Amino acid sequence: MEWIYNITLQNRLFLLKFMNKFSLEQLNQVPDGYKNSIYWNIAHTVVTQQLLTYGLSSEPLLIDIGLVDCYKKGTVTSSKASQKDLEIMKTLLFSTLEKTKIDYEKGKFKNFTPYTTSLKITLSSFEEAISFNAFHEGIHLGYILSMKNCLFLGD
């Protein structure tokens, strides 16, 4: 499991670079042809990780339900994130991942409700969910890289 946590950590370090490099205005902008902003994609990765791991294991989420309502699957950017939202998200990128790792090592995720993703992949265990999550976060990193180019934000 250490390997998959490291992949997710590396992806989130990449996401943090975007959050630190680009202005809040740039992070909130929805490019033509897209439904969501860079910030939405980053927040969506945090929300989805929580839903796939804690949610499907019937454990309390580590994030506020308001975040889930704004950034879960099927939502679109409906409001702009504030500087405070950005700072909270920077913290959640890493605190949620670290706490998930600790909780897994403590054996917290005993129960798991199978779930079939929109890609028709059925997740039957916590281990499958955390592995799929790394794939999912990679998809959203790809969206962000594409959006960055559409917005002419540079490297």
Image (tube, rainbow, N blue to C red):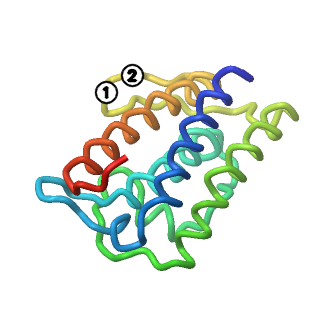
Q: With 53 as the anchor, is 115 left or right in this view?
A: left
Q: With 144 as the anchor, is 17 left or right in this view?
A: right
Q: Hey, which quadrant is residue 38 in on the image?
A: bottom left
Q: Is residue 114 above or below residue 60?
A: above
Q: Hey, which quadrant is residue 141 in on the image?
A: top left
| Residue at (23, 54) in percent of width and height | 152
Q: Is residue 141 above or below residue 88?
A: above
Tell me the quadrant of the picture where the N terminus can be found: top right
Residue at the outermost right position: 106
Q: Hey, which quadrant is residue 69 in on the image?
A: bottom left
Identity, as a three-letter code, of the amino acid under mark 1: Leu
Residue at the outermost front position: 154
| Residue at (74, 23) in percent of width and height | 2
The CA span between labels 1 and 2 is 6 Å
Residue at which label 1 appears: 119
Residue at which label 2 appears: 121
